[in-house]
Image: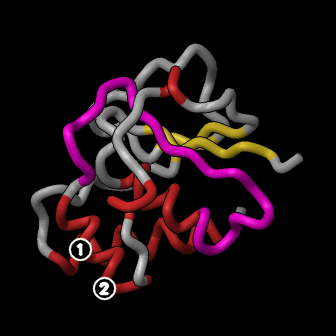
Amino acid sequence: MKDKVAFICVHNSCRSQIAEALGKHFSGDKYDFYSAGTETKPQIDKDAVRLMKRLYSIDMEQTQYSKTIDSIPVPDTVISMGCEVGCPYIGRAFDDNWGLPDPTGQSDEVFVEVIKQIEDRVRSL
């Protein structure tokens, strides 16, 4: 049975969704990847969806949706994407905080930089 890795941020609409998608894409044979938040959004960030399609041919809207921590399996490893807006309380300590800035509303260049940082960290798991 594979370890479960969860990427957590408040709204589960951008960075954590990118991390889940890249985790499945690059290391899905080693781990089960999930993302979640303490709140949800009606949809995944449109810029994240568009850039993930362009960069990796991954359509996050086909396989993922915004969800809360209580709707995923209990993870073995929990990673916070960044706490600049306050880390959500999930009932346990985070195993790591990647401290990534939220690219929502930023330029494509900022988005791509954050996506590449997430890719590097996912590949190093």
Q: Secondary structure at mark 1?
A: helix
For the point 37% across and 85% down, the residue is 55
Q: Position of residue 23 (x, y in %)?
A: 59, 63
Q: Position of residue 60 (x, y in %)?
A: 38, 62
Q: Is residue 118 magenta?
A: no
Contact flag, marks 1 and 2 (Cβ < 8 Å):
yes
- Name of the residue lying farthest toward the right: 1
Splitting the image into 4 quarters, where does residue 62 fall?
Answer: bottom left
Q: Is residue 34 magenta?
A: yes
Determine whether 40 is above or below 110 in the image.
above
For the point 80% across and 62% down, the residue is 30
Q: Is residue 7 left or right of residue 106?
A: right
> In the rendered structure, which segment of residues is drawn in magenta?
24-44
For the point 70% across and 39% down, the residue is 77
- Nearer to us in this view, 63 or 34: 63
What numbered label is drawn on residue 50?
A: 1
Q: Is residue 118 left or right of residue 125?
A: left
- Nearer to us in this view, 88 or 11: 11
Determine whether 113 is above or below 10 in the image.
below
Q: Position of residue 41 (x, y in %)?
A: 22, 37
Spatial separation of the CA atoms under disc 1 and disc 2: 6 Å
Q: Position of residue 89 (x, y in %)?
A: 46, 18
For the point 69% across and 34% down, the residue is 75
Label 1 neighbourhood size at 10 Å, few (<14), some (14-19), many (20+)? Answer: some
What numbered label is drawn on residue 54?
A: 2
Splitting the image into 4 quarters, where does residue 107 fall?
Answer: bottom left
